[in-house]
Image (tube, rainbow, N blue to C red):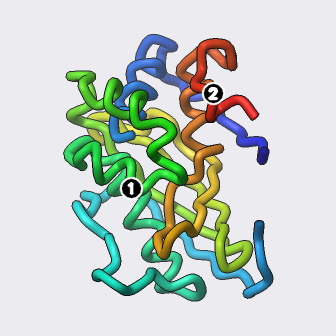
Amino acid sequence: MQRLHFRESPIVSTSLLVAIGLALAACSSGGSGNTSTKTTGPTAPPTSSAPATGSAEPTTGQDAVSAIKANWATFFNAKTTTARRLALLQNGQVLATVIKAQSKNPLAATATAKVSQVTLTGTNQASVTYSIYVGGQAALPGQHGVAIYQNGVWKVGLVSFCALLQLENAGKTSGLPAACKG
């Protein structure tokens, strides 16, 4: 399991926990060369980025980077349906109960995420730097995660989502879903 690093935020710890809760409510590499891009500031995420029926998202180049950015923004968007979030999370069905419970959090209405950098590390994995915003303010800036290409779609890596759950759980793995312990 890849280790993720979280930077401390100047926000009061209670606010941090709320921010993580809001973010969660939204809630094998090969060799194909690297593509990296950077952007700054929050923007309104798209509501859908699924490939057309029968087609798959690209696995290389700027189009793959764009798909990853759009899918992460959609996953962490509080307006995205639970079913869509599950489809954008690697092996999402194993955390369906958690995502459904988190989506009922009334504080989730102002959570968004913005990907600032993507580095493709193969045709089925990418390193992602992202920030979670609450009410337009960066609550968790500069987080590091993993995107996984699964069933023709770039998804938020299970390891990344579990790291947020662990952060919300005061850094402890006890009490986390079984899918996050392994």
Q: Is residue 99 left or right of residue 13?
A: left
Q: Residue at x 35, y 85 (%)?
A: 54
Q: Position of residue 30 (x, y in %)?
A: 77, 78
- Quarter of the N terminus within the rendering: top right
Q: Quadrant of the C terminus?
A: top right
Q: Position of residue 44 (x, y in %)?
A: 25, 58
Residue that carries the numbered disc 1 in the rendered image:
87
Depicted 165 relative to depicted 114: above or below? above
Mark 1 near mark 2, Cβ–Cβ under 8 Å?
A: no
- Mark 1: which secondary structure? helix
Residue lying at 28% horizontally and 48% vertically, measured from the top left: 83
Identity of the residue drawn at 63% across and 76% down: 36
Q: Which residue is mark 2?
A: 178
Q: Taking 90 as reference, is 83 left or right?
A: left
Q: Residues within 10 Å of mark 2 (few under 14, many from 20)?
A: few
In this rendered view, identify the residue nearer to me: 91 or 35: 91
For badge 1, the amino acid type reads Ala
Quarter of the image for residue 3 reads: top right
Res 179 quadrant in image:
top right
